[in-house]
Image (cartoon, rainbow, N blue to C red):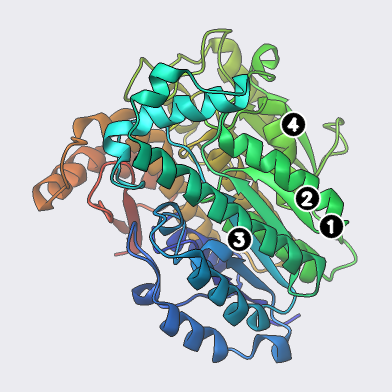
Amino acid sequence: MGIPVVVLIPLDARPVCLAWPKLLARMAGVELLTPPESILGHLKTPAKQDDLQTWVDSLSLAEAQVPFIVALDTLIYGGLIPSRMGIEPLTLLEERLVTWQPCLNQAHGFASVMRIAVYNNDAEEPGYWATYGKALSEFSIQIHRDGQADLALVASIPAEVRRHFLETRRRNMVIHRAFLDWAKGQTLESLVICQDDTGEYGLNRQEVDLLKSAVNGHNVSKKVSFQTGADEVAVSQLAKVLWKKFPPDSDQTPKVAPKISIVYSNPATANRVATFDGLAITTLVAHHVAACGGTIIDSLADADAVLWVHTPPNEVEIFGDYCEAPAPKATEEQIQSLRNTLALGKPTMVADVAAANGGSPDLVNALLAYDACPVNLIAYGAWNTPGNAMGSTVAMGLIHYWAFQNGSLVPELFRQALAIRLLDDGVYQSQVRSNFPTDRALNDDDAQKLQALMTPWAKTILAWAGLSRHAIRFSFPCQRRFEIEVNISPC
């Protein structure tokens, strides 16, 4: 088999959407073609539509039969965050549908139902979210849960804000129904509809229910799937495409994605509803394993790989963010569960969803207690929402497993990927992020402070991963504390 080639149009140029898929592809010996970063969107700045169209036209995808993974929000809105702004008229968006459809012969598309952030912050939302975000979230929840919103709550939100909020959502539903039409025909081979930052109630949950009914009406249920999260979907799709389109061609390797057995660090909390996903953790696991092309089995003995899931240590509320509440302490029983699972010797993925927006420091310390990275540890993730963490972890693990079976794994790049996730998810998000402000754009002084705070951890983790002769640089690519970029390179 020659070098597999896959094309990806990501949600935007943020590291987790662009740099991360590229690193996993390189790790697996896959050529991943992506647009130049300069023409992709960045936060509220949309992608350059004309340049993006020219780039896609230059690839001759249909003739080459190259798998094409595409963030449909990028094509129609210019990116995930621009999709929430509600600036462009529906007529313009419909024109883009017509323009892009001929370019997407049997593409693998994904698109996000608009989230409803639960806080007053407009960094990724329309400007009025800074004042009315919490109120709009409660307004949305009450309409879905109770059938109507409290009159006093309605009166507290200006009519023009409510009107724009609802109209933007109606517009997004029109676009999603067009995507379902694409799945009904030959435009899309598959369609993933994402629920970005969701809960048990809200207009976004109501909209997902309507789209599920529409899927049944279109009779395309085998081509359309629903999952929570958004930023991790590109790597989930990459994992699934590799196993489906480029199965390892040795008689000694499986022809389908591996069978995965699940181990929960605390089975008693495995059915807790995950913050920002609105689903039981067990359901979340099932969705993301399927999204990456895997199959869940009960038998550890018969499994090709193990997914160890760190769930809350007890029945307390799952904390929303490490910066907002004390981190839940992992119990000795949970740490021993991890040790026992790694001792089985099977390829093991570690997904930490005991809390949102960061990994358990106790779990990180337990992994670093090994003299070196366990040879059968093939993935770790705890970034952002539980859905983001789960999807990123399973995708990394199944891409690693595919590459290993295919004989194309680049071990050094895998160790870099693992170190990045530990440093970002397990250290920065839960142990360092609170040192930086949220009320201003971060600057060069902040970046220097970040480098100083992360360097001691970096030395430890790079040595543990067998990367002592590598340099590392940390930065704030979006000038805000929510995400960092970790660059590792040989000295």
Query: What residue is pinned by disc 4?
Result: 262
Q: Amino acid at mark 1?
A: His
Tell me the element at label 3. helix
Residue sitting at 46 percent across and 77 percent down? 35
Percent x, y of residue 353: 55, 29
Tell me which amino acid carries mark 4: Ile
In the image, residue 249 sits, relative to residue 43, either above or below, namely below
In the structure shown, which secondary structural element does the residue marked by tag 4 occupy? strand
Instruction: Determine if residue 326 is in view.
Output: yes
Q: Nearer the viewer, residue 35 or 114?
A: 114
- Which disc number belongs to residue 214? 2
Which residue appears farthest toward the top when viewing the image?
A: 315
**Res. 235 visible in picture:** no
Q: Which mark is residue 361?
A: none
Query: Which of the marked residues, 4 or 3, is nearer the chain's N terminus?
Result: 3
- Answer whether labels 2 and 4 touch (C-beta < 8 Å): no
Q: Nearer the viewer, residue 201 or 370?
A: 201
Label 3 vs 2, first from the N-terminus: 3
Contact, mark 4 vs mark 3 (Cβ under 8 Å): no
Q: Earlier in the sequence, mark 2 or mark 4?
A: 2
- The amino acid marked with disc number 3 is Ile
- Residue drawn at (67%, 34%) of the image: 284
Residue beneath disc 1? 218
Which residue has dot 3 on it?
A: 175
User: Which tag is nearer the camera, tag 2 or tag 4?
Assistant: 2
Q: What is the spatial separation of the Cα atoms under label 4 and label 3, in whole angstroms?
A: 37 Å
Task: Residue at 54% x, 55% y: name it.
Answer: 171
